[in-house]
Amino acid sequence: MLYLVAPAGQGRDVYATLYAQRMFFLVTLQPRGAQFEVIPYLDARHYAEVHLSRCRRDKSTDFQRWQDLFHQTFI
């Protein structure tokens, strides 16, 4: 099972496994299914940091939820 870590832009999202939280996937939704790419921890963290920065800049109402998820996943 996977859980959403952060949107990565351009129809892509970063997911992590529930079982081994150090496995991250960049998932791209396509008309004929989804493409999964294993990515390193630091790449996943980078995507999440960029998303947090965007939420902070845009004063998103979901900022606290994303920040909590970031801390739970990476700290």
Image (spheres, grey):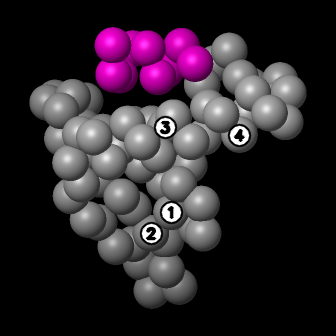
Q: CA distance from mark 4 to mark 2?
A: 20 Å
Q: Are marks 1 and 2 in contact (CB under 8 Å)?
A: yes
* Earlier-in-chain disc, 3 versus 2: 2
Q: CA distance from mark 3 to mark 2?
A: 16 Å
Return the residue at label 1: 12
Q: Position of residue 27 (x, y in %)?
A: 39, 62
Return the residue at label 3: 48
**What element does badge 3 sit on?**
helix
Against 57, residue 46 (above or below) is below
Quarter occupied by the N terminus: top left
Q: Residues within 10 Å of mark 4 (few under 14, many from 20)?
A: few
Amino acid at pointer 1: Arg
The magenta segment is 67-75
Against 8, residue 61 (above or below) is above
**What element does badge 1 sit on?**
strand
* Earlier-in-chain disc, 1 versus 2: 1
Nearest-to-viewer mark from 3 and 2: 3
Q: Are marks 4 and 2 in contact (CB under 8 Å)?
A: no
Q: Residues within 10 Å of mark 2 (few under 14, many from 20)?
A: some
Residue 4 in view here = no
**What element does badge 2 sit on?**
strand
**What element does badge 4 sit on?**
helix
Return the residue at label 4: 54
Q: Residues within 10 Å of mark 3 (few under 14, many from 20)?
A: many
Q: CA distance from mark 3 to mark 4?
A: 10 Å
Q: Main secondary structure of the magenta part?
A: helix
Against 57, residue 32 (above or below) is below
Q: Residue at x 58, y 18 (%)?
A: 67
The tag on residue 28 is 2
